[in-house]
Structure formats: structure tokens, C-alpha cells
Amino acid sequence: MNCKNCLHRRANRDLQPNGFTLMELLIVIAIILILMLMAIPTIGGLKKQANETSAMNSVQVILKAEMQYESTFPSNGYACSLAALGGDPKSGAPTVSAAQVLQPDLASGLKSGYIFNITNCTKVNLNGTDRITGYQITAVPQTIGKTGNRGFCSDESGAMKQDPAGGTNCVQNVGQ
């Protein structure tokens, strides 16, 4: 073997770059950034969809809490506020104004980017006592287009309707 060739081979081996060049790293970073920018709108849409699903489930939970309230306090009928459905179990036995049938996060009226409320209460007076016989549950996005697109409503009948504009004008059945 010729030593002259050995030195030449070693010299060529040392000239080969180890790792990536700066240009190659910049190209990879640019591709990653482009992919991230394409994914951001999708993530925002998924978040809104998750908030809407949570809002529909929360309306169902409030409906069940109303039925439980009505069976627990039949002379009062339904509750006309989320606070009446809520309450802290550590504070003692359930009362008409704090029935303890709704979780505190939902009883506060804010959950997953939606504002919940009980409105349009109808009552009758029986033997000098007001009894709530009807109500409407509303769930509207805190910021329309950002935390949700649709508003949701239900009442004592249990039918769930939606307002595609995000308000409380719920005239369409959910799923339309």
C-alpha cells in the first residue's frame, strides 16, 4: 500500500462535514413552521367544537338538576336560578336556595367558554305560594366565533334547540 494514498484519503475524510449545515437546519425549521401555521386554525376549530359539545352536555346536566330539584321541593316547582341548584354540601342540608344538585363550576354560570343562565320562569300561585312551572336554560358563547359559534336552549320539556348566530333565539333543533 502506498502511504501517499493513505494521507490523501485521510485528508478527504477530514473535509467531509459532520452534522447539518446551517442552510439545512433553516430549511427544516421553515418546514416545521409552515406545518404549525397550517395546524393552528384546525386546533381553534377543535376547541370551539369541544366547547359546544361541553355546552350541550352542561344543558343536559342542568335539565337533570331541575328535575331533581322539582322532586325534592315539589311545592316550589323548578329552580329559577343556577345558584338555587348549586350550593356547598359542607354548609349543611340542601335548601330551596341551595339545593346542592349542581356542581359549583356550572352553578357559577361559566364553563368551557359558555355563559349559562335560567330565564323566562313562569309561575302559578297555589294557596298563596308561588310555584315555578316553566323555565328556559340558555347557553351562549362568551365570545361568538372564538369560544363557540352556536347558542343552545332547552326548557322543562327537555327539547334541545340551537341558535346558529350564537344567541338565545333558539329555533332550530340541534343537529340541523
Image (cartoon, rainbow, N blue to C red):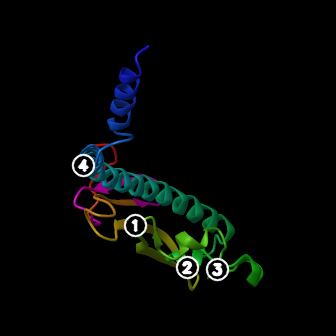
| Position in image of residue 100 (x %, y %) | 67, 73
- The kind of secondary structure the magenta stretch mainly shows is loop
Q: Which of these two is toward me, 158 or 28?
A: 28
The number of discs equals: 4
How far from the left and from the top, in percent, is residue 167? Answer: 27, 66
Depth-wise, is mark 2 or mark 4 nearer the camera?
4
**Secondary structure beneath disc 3?**
loop
Rounded to the nearest angstrom, the CA distance separating label 2 from label 1 is: 19 Å
Mark 3 or 4, closer to the camera: 4
Mark 4 and mark 3 in contact (Cβ < 8 Å)?
A: no
Q: Which residue is mark 1?
A: 113
**Mark 2 vs 3: CB contact within 8 A:** yes
Decide whether residue 160 is among the magenta residues: yes
Kind of residue at disc 4: Ala
Q: CA distance from mark 4 to mark 1?
A: 33 Å
Residue 2 forms part of the magenta stretch? no
Tell me the residue that label 4 is attached to. 30
Query: If the image is split into quadrants, where does the C terminus sit?
Result: top left
Q: Is residue 75 left or right of residue 140?
A: right
Q: Quadrant of residue 151?
A: bottom left
Residue 152 shows which numbered tag?
Answer: none
Q: Amino acid at mark 3?
A: Ala
Point out the residue furthest to the top here.
Answer: 1
Check disc 1 and give the amino acid type: Gly
- Would you call the spot at circle 1 few (<14 residues within 10 Å), some (14-19), or many (20 or more)? many
The local secondary structure at tag 4 comes to helix
- N-terminal label among 2 and 1: 2
Q: Write down the region rendered in magenta.
A: 154-168
Which quadrant of the structure image shows residue 75? Answer: bottom right
